[in-house]
Amino acid sequence: MKNIYYFDQNGNYLYMDTINADQNIPSNATTLVPEGLHPRFDGTKWNAMSREDFDKANPPMRPATPQTPSPADKALNALGLQLAETQKQLRITNQAVNALGLQFAKQQQGNTKNGDAQ
């Protein structure tokens, strides 16, 4: 088994893979181990960026500035909250109706056993 390191058409490092020792190395791979920041293969060796060049090419991201919701967003949020509350109340109502139905069914069974069937 041997490790090979793939690169794209521009020589940029992509990923490492392991192949059998008797397998041929693909044309877009090498056994040379890439080192450094953003390594690029030139056909014979890996060339890495200096820390300074890497930092210039990859500046730190600024945190996103929070946005104030628009009146439409606030209205949609309020409607969503109302819908959630309505759904909650509906669940509670359905549970109460189901409980009353069970009580009524039990009462009917009791009346039937006692001969009070209507």
Image: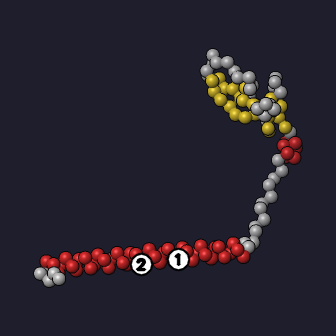
- From the viewer's side, name the closer residue of 118 and 58: 118
Q: What type is the residue that disc 1 sits on?
A: Glu
Q: In the rendered image, which quarter contains the N terminus?
A: top right
Q: Relative to 51, is 44 above or below?
A: above
Q: What type is the residue that disc 2 sits on?
A: Thr
Q: In the rendered image, which quarter contains the C terminus?
A: bottom left
> Which residue does the image show at 78% across and 65% down from the upper left?
65
Is the C-beta separation of discs 1 and 2 under 8 Å? Answer: no
> Which residue does the image show at 77% across and 60% down from the upper left?
63
Label disc, if present, on residue 100 of the rendered structure: none
Residue 9 visible in the picture: yes
Q: Quadrant of residue 32?
A: top right
Q: Which residue is mark 2?
A: 93
> Which residue does the image show at 69% across and 21% down from the upper left?
25
Label disc, if present, on residue 85 of the rendered structure: 1
| SS of the residue under disc 2 | helix
Query: From mark 1 to mark 2, how far is it between C-alphas?
Result: 12 Å
Q: Quadrant of residue 14?
A: top right
Left or right of 2, for residue 57: right
Left or right of 89, for residue 118: left
- From the viewer's side, name the closer residue of 36 and 99: 99
Label 2 environment density (alpha carbons within 10 Å; few <14, some 14–19, many ≥20): few
Q: Earlier in the sequence, mark 1 or mark 2?
A: 1
Residue 40 locus on image (x, y percent): 81, 32
Residue 64 locus on image (x, y percent): 77, 62
Residue 35 visible in the picture: no
Residue 110 locus on image (x, y percent): 18, 79
